[in-house]
Amino acid sequence: MLDFVAIDFETADPTHPCSLGIAVVKDSEIVLVKQWLIKPACYPYFHFYAQKIHGIKKEDVKFEPEFDELWIDIKPYIENQILVAHNASFDIGILRKTLEHYKIDVPKFNYFCTYQIARLTWKDSSKYSLDFLCEQEKIEFSHHNADSDAYACARLLLREMEIMGIEDFNTLKKITNKATKEEKLAKQERDILKQLRRREKLNIK
């Protein structure tokens, strides 16, 4: 049985969060879905494209607390937890940058990325976006609402592990680590081939 916390940030610009959603999973069941609106450190600035994506405007967060004020409530869902996100490098990056901005110590946690796991689960798929995979797996959610995205991410991980026949995170870590190493080796081989082809072209000239 799996215990983890799926997270999703929506941002006012590339680095400042304006919303955080979580979905808490205990014994492979979603037991809590929660969202915080956040007054971003860049307030009142909101990039027009970000607003277009998630629909949160500066007026919506004018009287909301900043992240450092919310941290006492958020921390228990992060510290010593297994976190899951879709395109986790973005969400984990936002978390770390925000904590550093407020000079808050980054707590210990482990994390997995449902985007990367999807590439192992559905190797022949043409797309791995959250909305595409959720439509494929009949997971209903409201895209770019942080709590709904976190819920969808939690459901997606449970489905991925079911399909792959994985029952624990230790096994999942071994598989993802192996895949990452293989991908790095494949990239190195491609880079070497490119260099050889360039040299061949220069020799021909």
Image: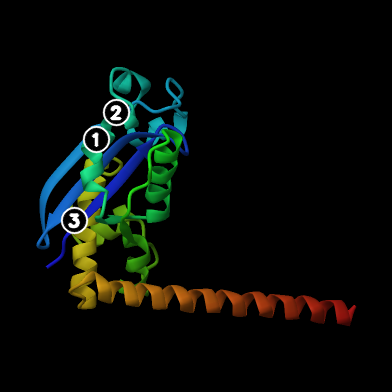
Q: Considering the numbered disc 3 on the image, is that residue within a helix, a strand or a loop? A: loop
Q: Quadrant of the C terminus?
A: bottom right
Residue beneath disc 3? 139
| Residue 172: quarter of image | bottom left
Q: Disc 1 vs disc 2: Cβ atoms closer than 8 Å?
A: yes
Calculate the distance from the C-alpha at mark 3 to the C-alpha at mark 1.
31 Å
Q: Badge 3: few (under 14), some or many (20 or more) residues near its Cα, within 10 Å?
A: some
Q: Considering the numbered disc 1 on the image, is that residue within a helix, a strand or a loop? A: helix
Residue beneath disc 1? 72
Where residue 187 sits in the image (x, y, percent)? 57, 74
What residue is shown at x 38% (from left), y 62% (from top)? 127
Residue beneath disc 2? 69
Q: Extreme right residue here? A: 205
Front position in the image: 12 or 92:
92
Q: Amino acid at mark 1?
A: Ile
The mark lying in front, picked from 2 and 3, is: 2
Q: Is residue 178 left or right of residue 205?
A: left
Q: Disc 2 vs disc 3: Cβ atoms closer than 8 Å?
A: no
